Image (tube, grey):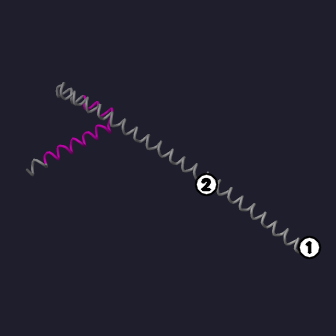
Amino acid sequence: MTTTSNVKNKVENVVDETESTVDQAAKDLQDSVDAFARTAQETVDTTVNTVGDTVSRTASSLSAAAANLADASEAIRDNEIGQLGRDISKLARRNPVVFAGGALLLGYAIARTLSDARYK
């Protein structure tokens, strides 16, 4: 009976160790899943903030461009040519990117108009 008792004790010990190992593995897996979920959420939050900041800056730039175009429209309508040249020069110094973009758009519009007129 001692042999049976020894085998039974060894089997119980192996079962206990196996259960302990499985419990530890399950805990480690849950910790990994939790860490992954936190990392994923942080990535989402960072991405949302980055995209939000980019959209905000773009909207601000577009708003400034619209205001500058409105100012330019008023200047063209209300001022003489000399004053218009000075105002355009000031605009170019204050907002060179907006000025360059406006010049590019104006050049594109003129080119399209001329090319359309040539083919008609």
Side of 81 relative to 15 (left or right): left
Please report the bounds of the magenta region as a residue range. Answer: 87-114
In the rendered image, residue 53, in percent from the top left (x then y), is placed at: 44, 40
Of residue 61 and residue 55, the one placed in the foreground of this image is 55
Disc 1 residue type?
Thr
* Label 1 crowd (10 A; few <14 / some 14-19 / many >=20): few
Q: Which mark is residue 33?
A: 2
Q: How many marks?
A: 2
Would you say 5 lies left or right of 44 here? right
Q: Secondary structure of the magenta portion, mostly?
A: helix
Figure check: 24 above or below 54:
below
Q: Residue 66, image x and y in percent?
A: 29, 34
The residue type indicated by label 2 comes to: Val
Q: Secondary structure at mark 2?
A: helix
Q: Which residue is mark 1?
A: 2
Where residue 86 sits, quadrant-wise, is: top left
Q: Which residue of the protein is positioned furthest toward the left in this rendering? A: 120
Which residue is located at x 87 percent, y 74 percent? Answer: 4
Q: Which mark is residue 84?
A: none
**Please, is residue 101 above or below residue 2 in the view?**
above
Report the front residue among 109 and 79: 109
27 w.r.t. 64: above or below: below
> Residue sitting at 28 percent across and 41 percent down?
101
- Residue ID at (57%, 50%): 39
